[in-house]
Structures are given as C-alpha cells and as structure tokens.
C-alpha cells in the first residue's frame, strides 16, 4: 500500500475535505496548495499524478494528532486519569 493509498483512506474514513487537510498540514507549518493535494489524490495512471512522499504523510499524521487531540500545551492541562 502506497502513501497515496493511506492518505486517501484516512481522508474517506475521517470525512475530510481538501480544505480540512490543508488546515491540518498548516498546524505543523507544512504548506501545500489545493492543486498539489489534488495531484496526490489522482489515480496513478493520470498524467498529473504525484506520489505522496514520506514527508507529506508524516506531517499530515502529526497534524492529525494535533487536530484530533489538541496541542501538547493544551493536553497538559487535562486531568490525569488512572
């Protein structure tokens, strides 16, 4: 499974739009344009297809953590359960 497939599956599973993904990437100071993102989601036989690099996927996953759980600073204020 390629990085493109992983990103596509996460996009569908989490009901994310292109703008949501761009905002998630901005949380970790990784800027990507809508057209670059569109190229990643194309089929691999399309002429404008672009492979999703490790850096893009890594930054998306790190941004997704912040998006879903909040930043480290805000999570340190949560009570410790256990």
Image (cartoon, rainbow, N blue to C red):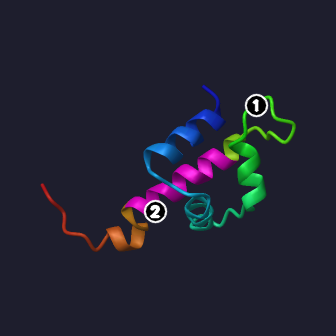
Between 1 and 28, the residue placed more toward the observer is 1
Res 7 quadrant in image: top right
Quick check: is 25 in the magenta stretch? Answer: no
**As displayed, is residue 37 above or below residue 52?**
below
Expressed as whole percent of the image width and height from the top left, the position of residue 36 reads 77, 53
Give x and y (percent) for residue 31. 71, 64
Q: Which quadrant holds the N terminus?
A: top right
- Chief secondary structure of the magenta portion: helix
Residue 24 vertical placement versus 38 (above, below): below
Question: Which segment is the magenta one?
Answer: 56-68
Q: Nearer the viewer, residue 46 or 9?
A: 46
Q: Quarter of the image holding residue 20?
A: bottom right
Image location (x, y in percent) of residue 45: 80, 29
Q: Earlier in the sequence, mark 2 or mark 1?
A: 1
- Residue sitting farthest toward the left: 82
Image quarter (top left, top right, bottom left or bottom right) of the C terminus: bottom left
| Secondary structure under the numbered disc 1 in the rendered image | loop
Picture residue at 65% right of the left edge, 67% below the top: 29
**Residue 71 position (above or below residue 9):** below
Q: Which mark is residue 18?
A: none
Q: Which residue does the image show at 52% across and 38% down from the upper left?
A: 9
Q: Residue at x 44, y 50 (%)?
A: 14
Q: Is residue 64 left or right of residue 81?
A: right
Which residue carries the number 1 mark?
A: 44
| Spatial CA span between label 2 and label 1 | 30 Å
**Where residue 40 appears, x then y in whole percent?**
72, 44
Residue 61, magenta (yes or no):
yes
Q: Which residue is mark 2?
A: 66
Q: Residues within 10 Å of mark 1 (few under 14, many from 20)?
A: few
Label 2 Cα crowd, 10 Å radius (few <14 / some 14-19 / many 20+): some
Q: Secondary structure at mark 2?
A: helix
């Amino acid at each position: 499974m390629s990085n493109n497939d992983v990103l596509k599956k996460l996009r569908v599973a989490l009901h994310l739009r292109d703008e949501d993904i761009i905002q998630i990437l901005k949380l970790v100071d990784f800027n990507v344009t809508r057209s670059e993102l569109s190229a990643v989601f194309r089929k691999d036989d399309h002429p404008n297809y672009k492979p999703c690099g490790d850096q893009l996927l890594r930054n998306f996953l790190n941004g997704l953590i912040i998006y879903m759980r909040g930043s480290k600073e805000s999570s340190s204020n949560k009570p410790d359960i256990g």
